[in-house]
Image (spheres, rainbow, N blue to C red):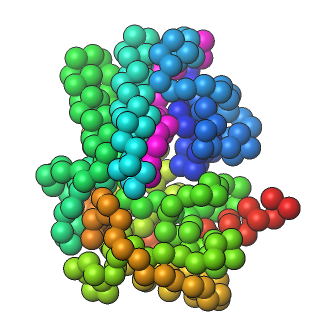
Amino acid sequence: MSVLVTGGAGYIGSHMVLALCEAGESVVVLDNLSTGFKWAIDKRANFIKGNAGDVELVSKIIIEHNIKEIVHFAGSIIVPESVVDPLKYYENNTATTRNLLEAAVREKVKHFIFSSTAAVYGMVGTKPVSEETPLKPASPYGRSKLMSEMMLEDVSNAHPITYGALRYFNVAGADASGHLGQSMPNATHLIKVAIQAALKQRKHIDVYGTDYETPDGTCLRDYIHISDLINAHSLLLNHLRNGGKSEILNCGYGRGYSVTQVIKMVKKVSDIDFKVNEVARRAGDPACVVASSEKLKNLLNWQPQNDDLEKIIASAYDWEKHLMKMKR
């Protein structure tokens, strides 16, 4: 039997592939390489280039590789882009998940893990959000992911398949081995953008809004290290394998850092100053998004090991310098 990982050449997907391979699992990666990198896929995994929404291709892969579990990362993730190009997000996220589920049901896949997002909560104020917080996504990105969650619930009710969905908060950092990290040059993640500014890959960094109802006026986010996020996926997969019921779980540390605090920490870690511009707010950006992850901790005994902003940024900074060397 094998585990199928869609989007396994991307930032989070490649870390999951590495973890599965390290655990001795047989892994198949399906990725169209539109945003991922073939070199990021662990050599022990079988790689197939293609689209996760191609029902016939996925069905063929499931049969040929005896797939019983799917971990689904493929999709588009940039909130502002989703506001100006919503149909791209409903195609790449919602429609792709729908087609992937069709193949999974057709070929009797047992378990399905979905990469969801805190964006399903929308504008939530300043208190940590639990899984019971009302869902009011403020962007097509968040809505596209919420629609996928709804499909998972309906499909699981109608067919013998269990699922887990992890609602990510802000994922950052790099694997401790130094072999993997956030590699997209045009990524919009704050930590990566700030590090690129420190390393002179960008002329400056823009701060989108300084008039939010937060302590310093800039947005607050819950930053989670990639390794702790991947550990949550592994625990969730084992939960389903052991007969556990379907679950939707928040995955964050339960504390928020402002844009200003993150920039200051990047300057501290790098010991480099860089230009910061204050610009207007972006559409779809909540003032604060911080997780309550008690359900994840209690249900799966998740014990994060990297809950330290300086540590997260240091690993991301080391990875960015490694990328620069790779490009020479």
Above/below status of 130 relative to 275: above
Which image quarter is the C terminus in?
bottom right
Which image quadrant is residue 316 in? Answer: bottom right
Residue 49, image x, y percentages: 65, 27
The residue shown at (31%, 34%) is 148
Drawn side of residue 123 relative to residue 206, left or right: left
Above/below status of 257 relative to 100: below
Above/below status of 231 relative to 192: above
Tell me if I can see residue 309 in this picture.
Answer: no
The residue shown at (76%, 65%) is 324
Q: Nearer the viewer, residue 192 or 310?
A: 192
In the displayed orientation, state which residue is furthest to the right. Answer: 328
Q: Which residues are magenta?
A: 64-78
Above/below status of 196 relative to 70: below
Q: Is residue 210 magenta?
A: no
Residue 23, image x, y percentages: 60, 41
Q: Nearer the viewer, residue 83 or 146?
A: 83
Which image quadrant is residue 145 in? Answer: top left
Tell me if I can see residue 184 in this picture.
Answer: yes
Drawn side of residue 183 relative to residue 285, left or right: right
Residue 2, image x, y percentages: 57, 24
Which image quadrant is residue 216 in? Answer: bottom left
Which image quarter is the N terminus in?
top right
Residue 173, image x, y percentages: 56, 64
The residue shown at (39%, 54%) is 79
Q: Disc count in the image?
A: 0
Q: Nearer the viewer, residue 275 or 133?
A: 275
